[in-house]
Amino acid sequence: MRREIPIALAVVAAAVGVAVADTNSGVRTWLQVRRDLAVAQARVVELEKRIETREGETESLRRDPLALERAIREDLGLAKPGETVVRGLDTSGTPRPATR
């Protein structure tokens, strides 16, 4: 009986090895699907955080007329008297005006 356990474990290990190595077994596909799922779930978390941030910004613009005015001026590249408009590139490479 003691001799049968290592033999059974070796057979199971060999079967698992063949299943993982065989591209037609579906094990590789299953592993890839699991990796893709993990990536998708991480992306969902990231997007949910961005949504929360945008909702906070939206609420701020609804409540605070000065914040709304500033956001509009920044988007249009306009300035109040005494302000200086400085234009630059943000990290995405698209021009975005900034006021000071």
Image (tube, rainbow, N blue to C red):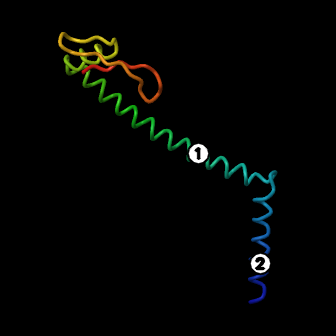
For disc 2, the marked residue is 8
* Kind of residue sitting beneath label 2: Ala
Q: Nearer the viewer, residue 16 or 42?
A: 42
Dot 2 falls on a residue whose secondary structure is: helix
* Kind of residue sitting beneath label 1: Leu
Q: Nearer the viewer, mark 1 or mark 2?
A: 1
- From this viewpoint, which residue is outermost toward the bottom? 2
Residue drawn at x 25%, y 16% is 84
For disc 1, the marked residue is 37
Residue 27, disc: none
Separation of disc 1 and disc 2 at Cα?
33 Å
Q: Position of residue 26 (x, y in %)?
A: 76, 51
Q: Position of residue 2 (x, y in %)?
A: 74, 89
Of the two numbered discs 1 and 2 on the same chain, state the one appearing first in sequence: 2
94 to the left or right of 63:
right
Quadrant in the rendering for residue 17: bottom right
80 to the left or right of 38:
left
Dot 1 falls on a residue whose secondary structure is: helix
Residue drawn at x 79%, y 67% is 15
Q: Position of residue 66 (x, y in %)?
A: 19, 18
**How many marks on residues?**
2
Quadrant in the rendering for residue 90: top left
